[in-house]
Image (spheres, rainbow, N blue to C red):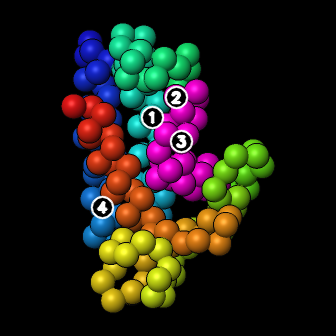
Amino acid sequence: MASSTTVAHNFLDTHVVPNHEEWLVQPTDLRLAMNAVLSLYHMADHFWHAYGQTDPDRTFHTARAGEFRAEMARRDSRFAVLRDVAEAHKHMRLDRPVRTVTESSQTAVGSTGYGEAGYGTGPFGGGPSIVVVLDDGSKQHLSNLAYEVRQLWISMLT
């Protein structure tokens, strides 16, 4: 039987990275995007189960995977948005008081104009991408959020 830490690395290698890489080939495919987002989000559960009991410092001394996900969202705004996109995709509408996105429809293929979203976070020349419109009206490119969260998981696993 593999160790729990190996299982966490395996989830990254067999689900997170391939789902993300497949989406990068077709960056406006919502199905591929949601597969990548859901894998990135559920990596939190695999990480917590790998380290929650054996190395509680790595999981911020949280008692359950759900607490760890919430703490990750408090500590990292990119994970918070990704979490809300994933949960809105699953539930269609979020009603918890602390959220950045309320409805699944806030994530769609679109584009951003000059000054919208972060500089250099979307396609060169402002072409179409999957854009998240946050509740405050600001926009973010989902591809950039996914990349940053992927890098976060890789750094946390090393």
Q: Badge 4: how crowded within 10 Å, few (<14), some, or many (20+)? A: some
Mark 2–mark 1 distance (CA, rounded to whole Å): 7 Å
Mark 3–mark 4 distance (CA, rounded to whole Å): 25 Å
Q: Earlier in the sequence, mark 3 or mark 1?
A: 1
Q: Between 25 and 66, which is closer to the camera in this rendering?
A: 66
Between circles 2 and 1, the one closer to the viewer is: 2
Please state if 145 lies on the left or on the right of 81 as rendered. Answer: left
Q: Between 14 and 142, which is closer to the camera in this rendering?
A: 142
Residue under pointer 2: 68
Q: In this view, does 46 lie above or below 83?
A: above
Q: Can residue 72 be seen in this view?
A: yes
Between circles 4 and 2, the one closer to the viewer is: 2
Q: Which of marks 1 and 4 is nearer the N terminus?
A: 4
Tell me residue 128's x, y (percent).
43, 83
Q: Badge 1: how crowded within 10 Å, few (<14), some, or many (20+)? A: many
Between circles 3 and 4, the one closer to the viewer is: 3
Label pair 3/1, CB-CB below 8 angstroms: no
Residue under pointer 3: 73
Three-letter code, disc 4 = Glu
Label pair 2/1, CB-CB below 8 angstroms: yes
Q: Which of marks 2 and 3 is nearer the N terminus?
A: 2
Mark 2–mark 3 distance (CA, rounded to whole Å): 9 Å
Q: Which segment did they paint magenta? A: 66-89
**85 in the magenta segment:** yes
Residue under pointer 4: 22
Q: Can residue 49 be seen in this view?
A: no
Q: How many marks?
A: 4
